[in-house]
């Protein structure tokens, strides 16, 4: 299921959340995580599954667990990345699904220890394509994403691709996603894997439990 | 000067793009070329964009076919994908298909049918819709949104 991991919806923007979902459908995307005010959008619209996302900003280590705990049930919890110590706490906290805003990380903000912890706890890392599209953040984003990709190839934590779109024109189709991801060295197979990796994050494979049914 | 033999000529790829934007009339082909060339130069520099041999092979309505060297398709699509403004308005160049011939690319052209049941979002186009939001700008709706308002 091809997923766009983060689409920002705003009631004041030009496109309504439903229209964003329709545009995602025309771009061959089958699942969208809507962040923002999209309360009236059904769980499936025009054949596209919609999930709610909640982004938790940079917080201190005391208030962060409460913010995760109070997030609505059933929504995808994304944490905005910060310092290295915060990121380690974030990826290992139960209930956190994705680590986002990687392009704004300070140098060394996501090291091999954090990568290993993300792989162990099956926490995804979001690659936001809007950071590549905007010229101001492009260089930093390409550098950070290349570093993240190197770590992902070694530790195999889930990567998730997001368009970060705020309007209709920000949503990218599969061909454009492959081309944009090739700028930092991601192969076609890796892009396909990243677009389909949200299932592994939301419902990770668990050890098999044998249930004995009494006669 | 004799023209090159077919086997010695450079192989090319043709990328069909659909241009969507907030402009009233589709800008001319020359504007499309300049915008794509500038985007490629921004992303890959002058040397990288020169290797792509970008040209506009054909354009009609909201579709255009961009020609590039074979092997540079990914770079060209990436350069097209970073375009966010065109002729002063928000726009997007959406890649539809890549082909080895101009004719092959043209076969993927689909004229948008505004009144199909499959995509209710397009049914608002060309009709006046009263919006209660107050701001007098472009508004992209679906039929469900109209009923809601």
Image: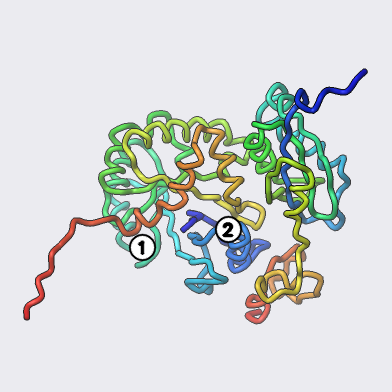
Q: Position of residue B12 (x, y in %)?
A: 73, 34
Whether residue A34 is visible to the viewer of this picture, yes or no, is no
User: Is B102 positioned to the left or the right of A179 in the image?
Assistant: right
In this rendered view, identify the residue nearer to me: A30 or B7. B7
In this rendered view, identify the residue nearer to me: A168 or B12. B12
Q: Position of residue B20 (x, y in %)?
A: 75, 54
Q: Position of residue B85 (x, y in %)?
A: 74, 46
In this rendered view, identify the residue nearer to me: B84 or B40. B40
Task: Give the quarter of the image for residue A18.
Answer: bottom right
Q: Residues within 10 Å of mark 1 (few under 14, many from 20)?
A: some
Position of residue B118 relative to residue B15, above or below, is below
Furthest residue in direction top, as rendered:
B1
Whether residue B116 is visible to the viewer of this picture, yes or no, is yes
User: Is A63 positioned to the left or the right of A144 in the image?
Assistant: left
Q: Position of residue A163 (x, y in %)?
A: 55, 50
Q: How is the image coloured?
A: rainbow
Chain of the residue displaying label 1: A
> Which badge, 1 or 2, comes first in the chain's sequence?
2
Badge 2 marks a residue whose secondary structure is: loop
Chain of the residue displaying label 2: A
Position of residue B11 relative to residue A73, above or below, is above
Residue at the (63%, 66%) spot, across then down: A19
Q: Are marks 1 and 2 on the same chain?
A: yes
In this rendered view, identify the residue nearer to me: A72 or A31. A31
The numbered dot on residue A71 is 1
Badge 1 marks a residue whose secondary structure is: loop
Residue at the (10%, 75%) spot, across then down: A213
Mark 1 and mark 2: Cα distance apart in space: 30 Å
Q: Which residue is mark 2?
A: A28
User: Is B32 positioned to the left or the right of A212 in the image?
Assistant: right
């Amino acid at each position: 299921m091809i997923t766009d991991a983060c689409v920002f919806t705003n009631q004041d923007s030009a496109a309504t959340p439903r229209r964003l979902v329709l545009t995602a459908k025309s771009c061959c995307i089958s699942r969208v995580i809507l962040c923002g005010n999209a309360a009236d959008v059904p769980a499936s619209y025009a054949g596209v599954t919609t999930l709610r996302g909640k982004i938790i900003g940079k917080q201190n280590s005391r208030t962060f667990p409460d913010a995760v705990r109070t997030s609505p049930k059933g929504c995808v919890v994304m944490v905005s990345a910060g310092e290295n110590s915060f990121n380690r706490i974030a990826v290992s906290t139960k209930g956190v699904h994705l680590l986002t805003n990687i392009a704004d990380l300070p140098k060394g903000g996501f090291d091999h220890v954090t990568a290993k912890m993300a792989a162990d706890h099956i926490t995804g890392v979001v690659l936001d394509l809007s950071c590549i599209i905007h010229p101001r953040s492009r260089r930093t984003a390409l550098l950070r994403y290349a570093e993240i990709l190197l770590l992902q190839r070694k530790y195999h934590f889930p990567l998730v691709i997001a368009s970060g779109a705020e309007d209709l024109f920000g949503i990218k189709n599969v061909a454009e996603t492959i081309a944009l991801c090739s700028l930092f060295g991601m192969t076609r197979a890796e892009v396909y894997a990243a677009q389909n990796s949200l299932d592994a994050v939301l419902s990770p494979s668990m050890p098999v439990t044998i249930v004995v049914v009494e006669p | 000067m004799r023209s090159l033999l077919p086997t010695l000529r450079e192989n090319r790829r043709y990328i069909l793009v659909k241009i969507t934007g907030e402009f009233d009339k589709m800008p001319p082909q020359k504007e499309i070329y300049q915008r794509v060339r500038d985007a490629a130069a921004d992303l890959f520099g002058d040397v990288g964009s020169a290797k792509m041999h970008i040209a506009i092979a054909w354009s009609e309505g909201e579709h255009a076919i961009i020609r590039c060297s074979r092997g540079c398709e990914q770079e060209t699509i990436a350069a097209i994908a970073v375009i966010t403004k065109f002729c002063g308005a928000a726009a997007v160049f959406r890649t539809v298909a890549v082909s080895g011939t101009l004719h092959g690319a043209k076969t993927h052209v689909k004229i948008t049918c505004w009144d199909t049941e499959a995509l209710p979002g397009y049914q608002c186009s060309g009709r006046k819709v009263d919006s209660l939001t107050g701001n007098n700008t472009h508004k992209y709706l679906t039929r469900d949104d109209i009923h809601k308002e």
